[in-house]
Amino acid sequence: MSRLDSFIRRLSAQRDILNTVANEVKMLGGPVLELGLGNGRTFDHLRELFPDRRIITFDRTVNAYGPSMPPADDLVLGEIRDTAKTFIGSNASLAHADIGTGYEDKDAITLTWLPEIMAGVLASGGLAVSGLPLDHPDLEALPLPSTVKDGRYFIYRRK
């Protein structure tokens, strides 16, 4: 598969999953967390899905396109593994992380801390959506929409 096709499948999976879980997330209280703002495409989509919800974004640096920038008080800059720890216990309704690199060795390092943070920021019943698998005893894997190939993207519920 070409890198372009892989990119399209990843973004389509991300969109399809976020659209699928949106109604459930709307029934839960708490903020939405976006780990990895990037250029702001997903943040912009989350803002459309949850217009009345606080969406807190995390990234190392600002790379987002102007209209896709969150308000300054909802943008947390620095190493995500460090900054997101301060939000453990925030009872988020949704935490989304698309911070995989595609390099197995680098992603293995991310997976030493990401599952703990994702489980820690969520309220009981909250949802984690991730481009990387999250192996954590407090996260229960959920079925994917039929449009998403197994292993491409992941959904979990906080127990």
Image (cartoon, rainbow, N blue to C red):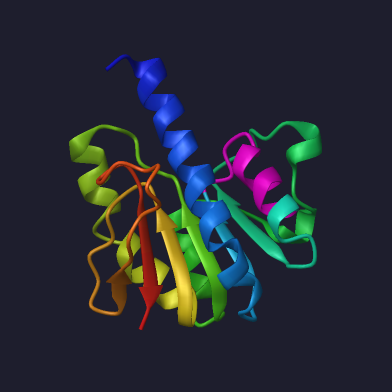
Please say whether residue 38 is one of the residues in the magenta stretch.
Answer: yes
Q: Is residue 158 above or below residue 58?
A: below
Q: Is residue 49 above or below residue 139?
A: above
Which quarter of the figure is the C terminus placed in? Answer: bottom left
Looking at the rendering, the stretch of residues picked out in magenta corresponds to: 36-47
Q: Could you tell me if residue 149 is visible in this image?
A: yes
Q: Is residue 33 above or below residue 30?
A: above
Q: Nearer the viewer, residue 91 or 47?
A: 47
Q: Residue at x 25, y 40 (%)?
A: 106
Q: Could you tell me if residue 77 is visible in this image?
A: no
Q: Is residue 43 above or below residue 95?
A: above
Q: Residue at x 53, y 62 (%)?
A: 21
The x, y position of residue 105, in whole percent, is 18, 38
The x, y position of residue 6, in whole percent, is 36, 25
The x, y position of residue 123, in whole percent, is 50, 82
Res. 38 image quadrant: top right
Q: Residue at x 54, y 53 (%)?
A: 18
Which quarter of the figure is the N terminus placed in? Answer: top left
Q: Nearer the viewer, residue 63 or 92?
A: 92
Please say whether residue 26 is one of the residues in the magenta stretch.
Answer: no
Q: Nearer the viewer, residue 124 or 13?
A: 13
Res. 65 image quadrant: top right
